[in-house]
Amino acid sequence: MSGLETADHVSVHLTGCGQEDASTVFGALEAAFPEVSGPEEKASASAAAKGAATVWCMVVDARTRATPRAVAPARLAAPVTVDLFGAADPVRQVKEELGVVFGVEDHGTVPGEHELEVRLQLGSHPDA
């Protein structure tokens, strides 16, 4: 983690999706955690032209989690793979907020000494 990030920050990486679905996911995270940095796209134009995957990134500060709010379930055009990196409790909070808006499948957790990596697959919420 950089000097600007703390144990409350969760790095969110999206793959397997286009800009519209990435915007939908990041919009949900921005509503749940009002102070985020990002999103940004990690792919060069030449890599994209060659069919390389685009990774959409955002950093969420779990300390800014909004109080309970009414959020509508969302639809995605296709499943989105999400990797969360951070300390266990902040990662759990981000996962919970994603579960309010999307259908979430847990695809595994890799524990580290001080942080976790969690892979999720998001789909449209069953009520959307």
Image: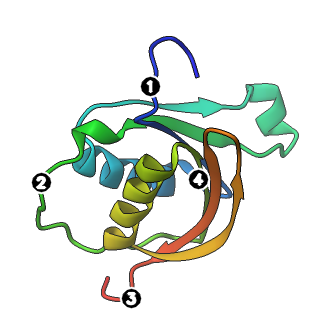
For marks 2 and 1, the one nearer the N-term is 1
Closer to us: mark 2 or mark 1?
A: 1
Q: Seen in the image, is 100 located left or right of residue 112?
A: left
Residue type of the residue flagged with mark 1:
Thr
- Label 1 belongs to which residue? 6
For marks 3 and 4, the one nearer the N-term is 4
Closer to us: mark 2 or mark 4?
A: 2
User: Are the residues tagged 2 and 4 within 8 Å (C-beta)?
Assistant: no
Task: Indicate whether 44 appears above or below 50.
Answer: above
- Label 3 belongs to which residue? 126
Q: CA distance from mark 3 to mark 4?
A: 21 Å
Q: CA distance from mark 3 to mark 2?
A: 23 Å
Task: Indicate whether 66 appears above or below 61.
Answer: below
Residue 34, percent across and down?
Answer: 23, 38
Residue type of the residue flagged with mark 2:
Thr
User: Are the residues tagged 3 and 4 within 8 Å (C-beta)?
Assistant: no
For marks 4 and 1, the one nearer the N-term is 1
Secondary structure under tag 2 reads: loop
